[in-house]
Amino acid sequence: MTVPAVDPRVPAVDPLVPVLTPRFPAGFLWGTATSAYQIEGAAAEDGRTPSIWDTFCRTPGKVFQGHTGDVAVDHYHRFREDVRLMAGLGLTAYRFSVSWPRVQPTGHGPAVQQGLDFYRRLAEELLTAGITPVATLYHWDLPQELEAAGGWPERATAERFADYATLAAEALGGLVGQWTTLNEPWCSAFLGYGSGVHAPGRTDPVAALRAAHHLNLGHGLAVQALRSTLPAGAQLSVSLNLHALRPLTPSDADREAVRRIDAVGNRVFLGPMLDGAYPEDLLADTAQLTDWSFVRPGDERTANQPLDWLGVNYYTPTVVSATAAGAEPARQDGHGGGTASPWPGADAVGFHQPPGERTAMGWAVDPSGLHDLLTGLTRRYPRLPMMVTENGAAYEDEVRADGTVDDPERAAYVHAHLAAVHRAVADGADVRGYFLWSLLDNFEWAYGYEKRFGLVHVDDRTQARTPKTSARWYGRVAGTGELHHPAGEG
Ligand code: FCB
């Protein structure tokens, strides 16, 4: 989304003026988010077959120190303990993903009962604890056999995805009422097939655009499959990592860079999914690469299914300029550099780190980007409810001698971003929930276990779970609906 160059930050607090604690609407969902490959482990148990991430992790040089999700944080065996942790904190919702290769190994044919049973037990456990389950169907773990057959650049993968959605809905529809089709299809398409820093690690700009289209189509087909399988009243959505864009300078050239990245970063999904058409400027920007003839008549209509809410994932803003001169050597694409571009048709654009505070990922801390995304979406789609389906931060947490973990930076980050959500609500955005990334320290893709995003610390050797001080603070916010300041929590 395009946002103004001027940064409308939260005004400084005058200590002489009493400050009201912001309060969120009753019924607002307070949760955490995770994904299957990042936490489950049990990679070869109960019929699960490899996904593209199992293969990628075994490709030398792709993942930090060759880490894998083979064991991850063993959530497959410890999910009851993890649900108890959430309940103990007072959280009211949980966003998890279903592993396609666990439920439908190879991506074809009937479901594996043991795989489905795991998610049934998880959903039952959540419901018993009074926690609303929110299931994501695809968080990047494509069955390896589907990649061998061409992966997301091929149309058949979108059709397979809809079949898998039906299997998941038949098994879990009585328990799960909130569904998300895809998590961050931008990463699947452009980091997976463009820059190659994510699985399957291909570096082909045309494959990336084809993947984006088949993810759009797969989303639409899956929504149709879910609507016809799930009980009435089920709520359907998709989670997008929309780029909160700012031009480096107000020059026309830098604003043109914003337009290009908005096209291939945001509107490539918003267009088909919410407007029913690819933006003309995206087709023009990429015309040297492809004529988009892989888009068949009717596909954009299929992608454009009514949604009950939109999931917005946000971590940091994206500052761009017309040329790469003076830009950061590593592209600010969220998950590492790589040498190939994840931006087909916009390779010349430069990416810049805003000055100021950064997280352990090197991502600038700037909550106003989240406010601007939510209010920008509201201007463009006035009747669209939203949930923040991911937001959070990695820091170099230290375990103290007494075993506790004090993480004031994380609490401050979340506090500032929740304040931005609250301001967006006050400005008219219909935001219904917030899911902190993440419940547990986990496998952070190409960064392996090096980066810790959890509210709960996980010991690499023993798998012991220890809520950090941010967890206690966040639980208090969830329990009261009031955005207390985290200062003094440790
Ligand atoms: C998002 C991913 C999530 C996690 C966070 C830090 O892009 O959806 O799995 O890696 O970033």
Image: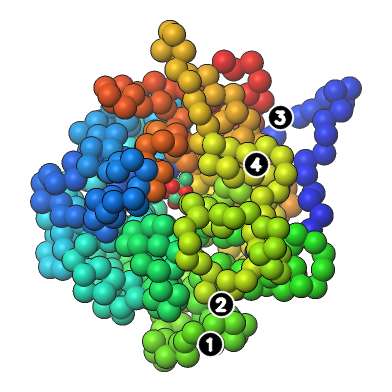
Q: Give how far across and how far down residue 488 sits, in percent.
A: 64, 16
Secondary element under disc 1, as helix, strand or loop, is loop
Q: Check if mark 2's residue and mark 1's residue have beta carbons within 8 Å.
A: yes
* Mark 3 and mark 4: Cα distance apart in space: 22 Å
For residue 21, which numbered disc appears in the image? 3
Q: Check if mark 3's residue and mark 1's residue have beta carbons within 8 Å.
A: no
For residue 106, which numbered disc appears in the image? none
Query: Which dot, 3 or 2, sits closer to the camera?
Result: 2
Secondary element under disc 3, as helix, strand or loop, is loop
* Mark 2 and mark 4: Cα distance apart in space: 28 Å
Decide which of tag 3 and tag 2 comes sooner along the chain.
3
* Mark 3 and mark 2: Cα distance apart in space: 46 Å
Decide which of tag 1 and tag 4 comes sooner along the chain.
1
Secondary element under disc 4, as helix, strand or loop, is loop
Say which residue appears at 82% left-offset and 68% top-offset. Answer: 251
Crowding around mark 2 (Cα neighbors within 10 Å: few <14, some 14 to 19, many 20+) is many
- How many numbered marks have been drawn onto this rendered protein structure? 4
Decide which of tag 3 and tag 4 comes sooner along the chain.
3
Amino acid carrying mark 2 in the image: Gly
Q: Check if mark 3's residue and mark 4's residue have beta carbons within 8 Å.
A: no
Name the residue nearer the viewer: 86 or 29.
Answer: 86
Amino acid carrying mark 1 in the image: Gln
What is the residue that sits farthest to the top in this orientation? 402
Say which residue appears at 79% left-offset and 51% top-offset. Answer: 7
Say which residue appears at 28% left-offset and 38% top-offset. Answer: 72
Crowding around mark 4 (Cα neighbors within 10 Å: few <14, some 14 to 19, many 20+) is many
Decide which of tag 3 and tag 1 comes sooner along the chain.
3
Q: Give above or below for 306 relative to 454.
A: below
Find disc 2 in the rendering and name its residue.
345
Amino acid carrying mark 3 in the image: Thr
Q: Give above or below for 450 relative to 253.
A: above
For residue 365, which numbered disc appears in the image? 4
